Amino acid sequence: MLPAGLRSRILNGVNGLAVHLLEAGQAGQPAVLLLHGFPELAFSWRKVMPALAAAGHHVIAPDLRGYGRTTGWSAGYDEPLAPFQMLNMVRDQLALLQALGLPQVEMVVGHDYGSSVAAWSALIRPDVFRRLAMMSAPFAGPPRFGVPPAGNPDAGLAGLQPPRKHYQWYYAERRAAAEMDRPPQGLHAFLRAYYHHKSADWPGNQPFPLAGWTPEELAKLPDYYVMPLEATMPEAVAPHLPPAEAPWLTDAELAVYAAEYARTGFAGGLQSYRCNTGGANAADLVLFGGRRIEVPAIFIAGSSDWGIHQAPFALTRMQEAACADFRGLQLIPGAGHWVQQEQPEAVAQRLIALAASATGR
């Protein structure tokens, strides 16, 4: 299912991993690193990579730790979370570049959870990651000593009528991986409904900013973010299964995701959520409190993506405080959360423009 010009290989000895990566373009050209989110794979960049390669870039898209054909990780619920904490995810990217013989990349691009990994990579090592494109998940900046995080919203959500729960805290539960690994409707149908529900194809995706971290405000989010209290994720999205495949994600393409997740399960991806909800990431990342992302940065999302507002105020903080050289919020019509798959040409154009821009104003 890979477009012409994309190559697949395994690279051993990468911070304890054997990393599966897709590549396009030629080694020696300015490098671009693409980091996927959940529940996706390097495969999610397949429609963007040829355009970046044609613009003169060596394009690299790995399956992240916990995903796909990258091996060397283990995701047992009772095993240590340290390998999945954010600093080690950044270490994975640095080790990958070292294994490829690359002292730096012209641009790091991240979508969804990959957006966080890309943002932290650029904040911590601006000498290596020279430009940054965040997609779908805004970066609000490092935590600070003495400033408590937003906390678990589930207690307040459970008291609403009807009662609700936050998906990230559901993802952190022991039962979540098994419920997603073996959904009653089958893995293909579950993923089809999940991807459709968060795309521009679902008419309910008409996002707007939330006024705060209150149960009443959070309850305005769709069921895939703030779920019915007793529902599993497969149950929450099941009513939204579309009658046919989408032009941006055909049944044949969806089968690639279904086959990989049938083989690996979802636990690897869910470990990163546990690092956030349990506070392990904040305990490390508070060391960077007060630092800003110094490299040129943009933010890309679909205009129908609720993800840009799921964390109240993060979108504003990213633009006004977290980035020292923020160069634009770019919302793409006709796309929801899966923007690089729904509107790949528009995404590629914006990435090529950022890669060609001067590093200093």
Image (tube, rainbow, N blue to C red):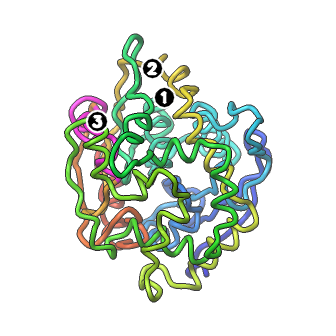
In x, y percent, where is residue 190? 56, 71
Front residue (pair 311, 171): 171
- Marks 1 and 3 close (CB-CB < 8 Å): no
Indicate the quadrant where residue 39 lies: bottom right
Numbered circle sitting on residue 124: 1
The residue pinned by badge 3 equals: 214
- Marks 2 and 1 close (CB-CB < 8 Å): yes
In x, y percent, where is residue 7? 65, 71
> What secondary structure is marked by label 3?
loop
Residue type at the position of mark 3: Thr
Q: CA distance from mark 2 to mark 1?
A: 8 Å
The residue pinned by badge 2 equals: 288
Q: Residue at x 31, y 31 (%)?
A: 322
Q: Is residue 267 visible from the viewing direction of this image?
A: yes
Residue type at the position of mark 1: Ile
Tell me which label, 3 or 2, sits earlier in the chain: 3
Callout count: 3
Q: CA distance from mark 1 to mark 3?
A: 32 Å
Residue type at the position of mark 2: Phe
Tell me which label, 1 or 3, sits earlier in the chain: 1
Drawn side of residue 296 relative to residue 74, left or right: left
**In the image, which is nearer the foreground, mark 2 or mark 1?**
2
Q: CA distance from mark 3 to mark 2?
A: 27 Å
Residue 100 inside the magenta-drawn segment:
no
Q: Which residues are magenta?
A: 307-323
**In the image, which is nearer the foreground, mark 1 or mark 3?**
3
Drawn side of residue 82 relative to residue 86, left or right: right
